[in-house]
Amino acid sequence: MVPYILCMILFLIGVYGIIAKKNLIKIVIGMVIIEYAVNLILILVGYRSGGAAPIITSIEGASREASTFVDPLPQALIVTSIVIGLSVTVLAIVLCLRLYEKYGTLDILHIRRLRG
Amino acid sequence: MILLYGLLIFMIIGAVIAIETKDLLSSVISVGAMGLALSIVFLLLSAPDLAIVQVVVEVLALIMMLRLVVTREDVTVAHRYRYGEVFATTIGLIFFGVFIVFASIVFKEMPEFGNPLLRVSRQYITEGFDISHAANIVTAILLEFRAYDTLGEATVIFAAIVGALVILRGKGRNI
Amino acid sequence: MKGMTLIVKTITRLLLGFIFVFSVSIILFGHITPGGGFAGGVMLACVFILLVLAFGKKTALDIVSEKAISIWDSVGSLSFLEIALLGFFGGFFFKDFFSKGSPLKLFSGGTILWSNISIGIKVFASLFAAFMALAIFRVRRER
């Protein structure tokens, strides 16, 4: 229960960064923090207390080892999610660079004012 | 468990510093510190695959964000308090309190921390090694049982990178 | 961009081979030990990014040119799709058509090894292409 609440606080800090900050770099940082929080909460749901990593080390004791594994399904989904998050971050950074070239600033208020 | 809570609180402090500090360079660096703490958390929760991926991805993301910060001449945020900002911050904090109350009601219904349901993945755990002959169950799920997901993921990476290359193209074309 | 100082260049020259071999080993043994195509691919991209940062982008583009990056990118994604399509010979999409082999050896697990290799090539080529685009891009102020 307590780790879930801590994760939710982390998520909310990211949401605050996206909503309230005026700088585009801060908005990208908020996106990254939200991504971390979501990855972490899915892994926390799949954790079994005292569980072992889901890797089999010997053929004979495979079934005995398998009874102590943590949930491997969220891990398999999060591995892809982390790499997708990196490429989405790259896309956001590239958009920020283009906006900086066009307007000469990263402040969204100035960008909005220069429209048209 | 103490170590897990300590790392989570460290990540929260790092997030607050990253959002609130004026110097953009130090905010990017504190995001990097958060990512390394996250990889240690993954290691504590017995997910070594994720820990490896998170460390390497964090280094790469840090390099690319530094590329964005170094572009600017001034690396600090202009900071001025106005009436509207104080109002928005107050409303935001009230909203966050309400959100945490409702989220804690939801978290009571979720499986208790340390006792996963394992409804879907019990078959993967018990029979995955016999079916796929791969010792790493995570890789077996990723590339054997759920390979469609991985194919879609490769497509998403391709689309995002091609989009980035198109945006960074030298001369803009009039559409 | 001329690259960094002599100390950085020397250390990079010493370390680069080890990082390269380690990343290839993470890709190849992804079905036995922790790791796999994603981690190894990002690490392989980090090898070339270290090369760019230490020696300047001209040296790195001599080793892996822009054409080569796009070819590697296409090869990675197409070979993964090819593995999926070859399953039709056995009956359905993504059927594991390879021989399973004995467990806990390198050549085991059917198509997982080859899928790992193609995913690693794909991730490496994509991320390195994005980094090179960011490194070549110069901010021009239109005033």
Image (tube, grey):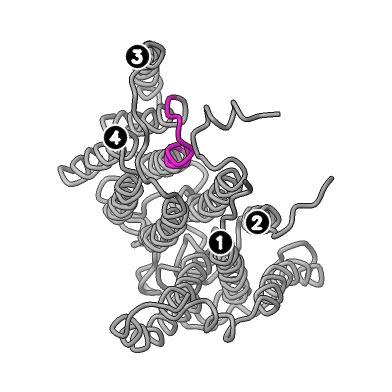
The part of the chain drawn in magenta is: A20-30
Q: Between disc 2 and disc 3, whose residue precedes? A: 3
Q: Chain of mark 1?
A: C
Using the rendered image of the protein, determine whether residue A31 is visible from the camera's viewpoint: yes
Please, what secondary structure does the residue beneath circle 3 have? helix
Depth order, front residue of C119/A10: A10
Please, what secondary structure does the residue beneath circle 2 have? loop
Q: Which residue is mark 4?
A: B16
| Residue B40 drawn above or below residue B116 | below
Residue at horizontal 37%, vertical 88%?
Answer: C13
Q: Which residue is mark 1?
A: C134
Dot 4: within a 10 Å radius of its alpha carbon, few (fewer than 14), some, or many (20 or more) residues? Answer: some
Q: Which residue is mark 3?
A: B86
Q: Mark 1 and mark 3 in contact (Cβ < 8 Å)?
A: no
Depth order, front residue of A67/C41: C41
Identified by mark 2, the residue type is Leu
Q: Quadrant of residue B131?
A: bottom right
Q: Which residue is mark 2?
A: B168
Q: Mark 2 and mark 1 in contact (Cβ < 8 Å)?
A: yes
Q: Mark 3 and mark 4 in contact (Cβ < 8 Å)?
A: no
